[in-house]
Image: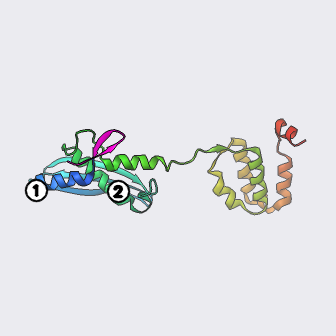
Amino acid sequence: MKTINIHGKQYVEVKERIKYFRENFKDWSLTSEVIDLTEDRCVIKATISNEKSRVIASGIAYESKGSSYINKTSFIENCETSAWGRALANIGIGLDVAIASADEVLNAKAQDKFKKPKIEKLTDDKFSAMIVAIGEGKGNTVRERLCKYKISKKQQAKIDELLSDKKVENGVLGIIDELNSIEVPTEIKKSNN
């Protein structure tokens, strides 16, 4: 079977495994079953049965929408291809080097590029800016951005308090009072003098 070199190892593409299967196992079947499907993820199980409908092997795959360039639009199709490749490998087709197919290895490498950014600590400056934004009626924007930061319990409690209807009714002046009550670290005080 034709292979592809990925970092010095030879891998067989799923299309090559399928061709081999169809040529050499004419009366056998390769079927797919969707195990889980949501708006942003998919799990598919592929099953290989012999001419007597006896299950010989299976393979399972998981894909997330947007985890790679191809998965932005075709995560379900990509998941099925991966499941087929694993099932075919489990009966020994294209198994010279690894169970993973070339398609899976390339997809895994592509997903590395799409890893989520690290969550950074919410600085005092950004925390103060969020408090002002809440006072200006931009509470929804603050809620959206909170997930990008690691927040202390004290910061979370303060933001939760300010986002409650009672504090928002006080408007900017109420928020300014809140800002004045926040302890500013000594190093920030020194840098502003």
- Residue at disc 2, secondary structure: helix
Residue at 44 percent across and 49 percent down: it is 111
Residue 86 shows which numbered tag? none
Residue at position x 74%, y 48% in the image: 127
- Is residue 2 highlighted in magenta? yes
Q: Nearer the viewer, residue 60 or 12?
A: 12
x and y, in percent, of residue 86 in the image: 27, 47
In-front residue for pair 4/36: 4
Q: Position of residue 134 (x, y in %)?
A: 75, 58
- The residue segment tinted magenta is 1-11
Q: Position of residue 79 (x, y in %)?
A: 34, 55
Residue, disc 1 = 26
Q: Nearer the viewer, residue 41 or 93?
A: 93
Q: Secondary structure at mark 1?
A: loop
Count the marks: how many?
2
Whether residue 119 is visible: yes
**Residue 78 got which mark?**
2
Residue 163 in percent (x, y) is at 72, 56
Give the CA distance from mark 2 to mark 1: 24 Å
Q: Earlier in the sequence, mark 2 or mark 1?
A: 1
Horizontal side, residue 145 vs residue 28: left or right: right
Q: Residue at x 84, y 57 (%)?
A: 174
Q: Quadrant of residue 98?
A: top left
Q: Residue at x 30, y 49 (%)?
A: 60
Quadrant where the C terminus sits is: top right
Q: Amino acid at mark 2?
A: Asn
Q: Amino acid at mark 1?
A: Lys
- In the rendered image, the residue lying farthest to the top is 186
